[in-house]
Image (cartoon, rainbow, N blue to C red):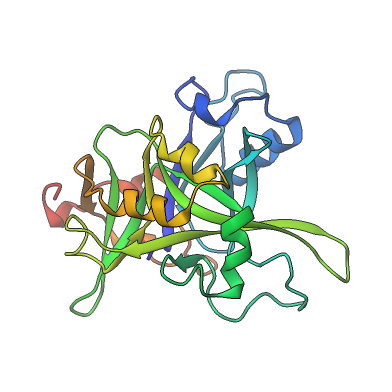
């Protein structure tokens, strides 16, 4: 599964793939507010467009979609609600992840699989290895420090009562690979690095999901690394939720990178 992840979007040209058009000023403002990006004295160059070290379900985060063949960045709520959902409350079951083996058989996901694919940019993600009194969190990331992309689904829904329009998304998970099997039996369906052609293939609605799924499952993540981190990434309770860079630092008592 994927229940927490990290994203740092820097405005230094390294993420050109997201910005095939100028960012809307309102979106830029929301990115900076949601991701705690810093602007010095209101005029100095910003350090990051978006910077969050503990993105949790129900929070807003950037996703990449394709409209008329042009990639665009949007902010969306991480917990999927389909566009046809008529209830006032969101679904009672967790929708921040979607199993790849359920997408085509479940009405809940099937429509978005055909017309609502998105890519979820990430600098890395957390996973917990169960055992003992407390599960051990690990931070998984690319060795070269570049962004990766998760296959996701998104929905734009109009609330039937208020008329409010909202966008939500989910991250697709698949069976684990040899790199991750020591930690968890499910992993994000990962589309590779910034220049990987799978990003374009996935965002193309004409691409067959089975073909993309097969291509991704054949990758064993030789360019990935993981390390144990401190347990203070765990809680999202009011007053105990932490979103700081030190969350991805190696846990001193756990030793070297794995």
Quarter assignment of residue 231: bottom left
224 in relation to 228, above or below: above
**Count of marks, rendered view:** 0
Where's residue 147, x and y in %? 39, 37
User: Which residue corresponds to the image point at 23% horizontal and 74% vertical from the top-left?
Assistant: 130
User: The N terminus is located in which quarter?
Assistant: bottom left
Where's residue 50, x and y in %? 54, 38
Where's residue 96, x and y in %? 52, 65
Instruction: Pick whichever, 152 or 184, lies toward us.
Output: 152
Query: Residue lying furthest left in this view?
Result: 255
Q: Can you see residue 77?
A: no
Instruction: Pick whichever, 32 or 88, lies toward us.
Output: 88
46 in relation to 237, above or below: above
User: Which residue corresponds to the image point at 26% horizontal and 63% vertical from the top-left?
Assistant: 176
As drawn, is 218 to the left or to the right of 243? left
Where's residue 101, x and y in %? 41, 70
User: Which residue corresponds to the image point at 29% horizontal and 52% vertical from the top-left?
Assistant: 139
As drawn, is 96 to the left or to the right of 6? right
Quarter assignment of residue 228: bottom left
Q: Can you see residue 151?
A: yes
User: Which residue corresponds to the image point at 25% horizontal and 51% vertical from the top-left?
Assistant: 218
């Amino acid at each position: 599964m994927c229940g927490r992840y990290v994203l740092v979007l820097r405005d230094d040209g390294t993420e050109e793939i997201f910005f095939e058009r100028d960012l809307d000023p309102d979106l830029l403002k929301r990115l900076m507010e949601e991701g705690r990006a810093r602007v010095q004295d209101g005029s100095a160059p910003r350090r990051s467009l978006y910077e969050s070290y503990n993105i949790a379900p129900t929070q807003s985060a950037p996703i990449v979609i394709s409209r008329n063949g042009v990639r665009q960045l949007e902010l969306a709520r991480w917990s999927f609600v389909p566009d046809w959902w008529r209830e006032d409350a969101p679904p009672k079951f967790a929708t921040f992840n979607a199993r790849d083996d359920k997408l085509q058989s479940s009405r809940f996901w099937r429509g978005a699989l055909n017309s609502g694919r998105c890519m979820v940019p990430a600098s890395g993600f957390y996973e917990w290895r169960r055992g003992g009194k407390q599960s051990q969190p690990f931070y998984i990331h690319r060795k070269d420090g570049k962004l990766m992309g998760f296959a996701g689904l998104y929905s734009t829904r109009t609330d039937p009562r208020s008329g409010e329009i909202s966008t939500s998304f989910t991250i697709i998970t698949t069976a684990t690979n040899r790199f991750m099997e020591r930690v968890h039996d499910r992993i994000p369906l990962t589309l590779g690095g910034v220049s990987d052609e799978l990003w374009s293939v996935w965002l193309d609605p004409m691409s067959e999901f089975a073909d993309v799924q097969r291509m991704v499952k054949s990758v064993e993540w030789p360019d990935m690394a993981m390390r144990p981190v401190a347990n203070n990434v765990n809680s999202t309770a009011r007053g105990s939720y932490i979103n700081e860079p030190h969350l991805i630092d190696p846990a001193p008592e756990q030793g070297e990178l794995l």
